[in-house]
Image: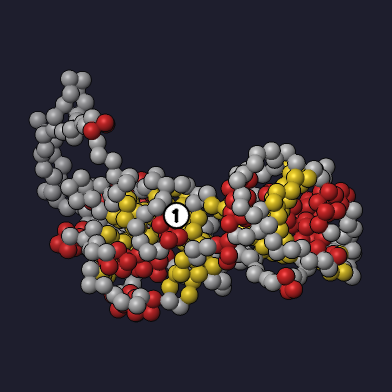
Amino acid sequence: MVGFMGRCPECGAFGSFQEVERAETSSGRKVKSASSAERLNKVQATNSQRVKTSINEFDRVMGGGIIKDSVTILTAKPGAGKSTLLLQVANDLARQGIRTLYASGEESTSQIKSRADRILKEIHDDLHVVSDNSLNSILDIIERTDARFIIVDSIQTFTLDEFPTSRAGSPTQTMECAYELVKIAKSPDKPRIVFIVGQMTKEDELAGVRALEHLVDTVLVIEGESGEELRSLVSTKNRYGSTGEMGFFNMTEEGMVSIDNPSEYFMTKRSEENQVSGSALTVVREGTRPILLEVESLVSPSFTPYPARIGESMKREQMNTLVSILEQRGGIPLYDKNVVIKTTGGIKLKEHSANLAVIVSIVSSVHDSPVGSDTVFLADVGLTGELKKVPSLEARLREADRMGIRTAFVSSDYSRDTKLDNLKVVRLRTLKDVLGKVF
């Protein structure tokens, strides 16, 4: 005997219920018909089926290209370049013969066309665009156009008709829309590439429930200050590549321009007769890649009881620690000096491998004595004044050698001999040894 329910508690409609029989297991648990299982060793892996673009830094962050049946979320602050980058990627793939669909729930098609005219030299015929907030309509267009690369911008503005009581951006609508997009991307018959734009909260986090990040294959974040050109693309999750990988771009009027040689970008080229004081080079790791980086310092007299300590690119606590080490272990008094530190390009100093370079740049400014631009400093400095080894030193040395650096100062506990073309590795034990050798 089936009970009667007159009015639906969800939508309020009368007579909308239908009786459906469901299979039951021997234990009485209701089940749906199961999908067929496959032998794992017979499953065809798609990891090698990557689609490459002409944007090198984008491909690097994606792990060497885009997997054909993958779902990616891209998030950033407003104005960081999310829509610009994806429009460039979409046009690039359309040029390769991959039919693309750019679905926007925020902008009209004329607004998207205006941006495309500004950043794209030529708009390809296989790039389609639609402005609609109904994901049902978008899914229908995907089937009719047979689009293989889909951009949904942004997920918080779309709704499914099946959930009329939930507004756009609610957890229910956001997750259900994402589930539908994952379903069409993972279709074994027609695998598709799906990119979802996600809005960012005031706390600089992806808006919505955390389950959204778990659902997708890759999560990308664009970082950068609104008043600066430099943008970094970071993968905070990547099932098909390295989590934490980073790519660099210049945000210009013509769109996002890939910085294919960051080591050249984050240092200042100077001839031997134009060397300046207050500059020192190091090699930092951003993602899995070593990058040559210039550290600049300015030391000036202070006429106040509390000298200024300004570190635009590092934490104040870390900077004060290095200043104290330099005073106590290096014999350089700074109690009456202002100290300002920054990096070329504005990269944040998140690791301790740059500490020796920071200290050397300060001493160079104090003595007004330039350090050669063919020298790098690769060591942490302990409170005892001893040099400490840094991780992945071999990769850093190879990058310095590739960029034409001739001398590298490292800690004395480095024992491996890396094959280098022109780079000379100098092993020293203490900070005083380095300062005595350089100055």
Left or right: 407 as drawn, with respect to 324: left
Q: Nearer the viewer, residue 203 or 122?
A: 122
Q: Position of residue 129 (x, y in %)?
A: 26, 70
Which amino acid, by three-letter code, is at mark 1?
Val
Q: Nearer the viewer, residue 115 or 247?
A: 247
Q: Nearer the viewer, residue 194 or 4?
A: 194
State the image quarter where residue 278 is shown.
Answer: bottom right
Q: Position of residue 301 (x, y in %)?
A: 87, 69
Color scheme of the displayed model: secondary structure
> Can you say which quadrant of the picture contains the N terminus?
top left
Q: Position of residue 75 (x, y in %)?
A: 44, 59
Whether residue 35 is visible:
yes
Q: Looking at the image, how many numbered discs can be counted on the residues?
A: 1
> Can you say which quadrant of the picture contains the C terminus?
bottom right
Q: Which element is circle 1 on?
A: helix
Q: Residues within 10 Å of mark 1 (few under 14, many from 20)?
A: many
Q: Position of residue 415 (x, y in %)?
A: 69, 38
State the image quarter where residue 164 is shown.
Answer: bottom left
Reading the image, the residue beneath label 1 is 61
Left or right: 140 as drawn, with respect to 151: left
Residue drawn at point x = 17 percent, y = 63 percent:
145
Residue drawn at point x = 87 percent, y = 68 percent:
302
Whether residue 338 is visible:
no
In the image, farthest residue toward the top: 26
Left or right: 235 as drawn, with respect to 196: right
Residue 326 vertical placement versus 260 (above, below)? above
Left or right: 277 as drawn, with respect to 39: right
Residue drawn at point x = 34 percent, y = 77 percent:
121
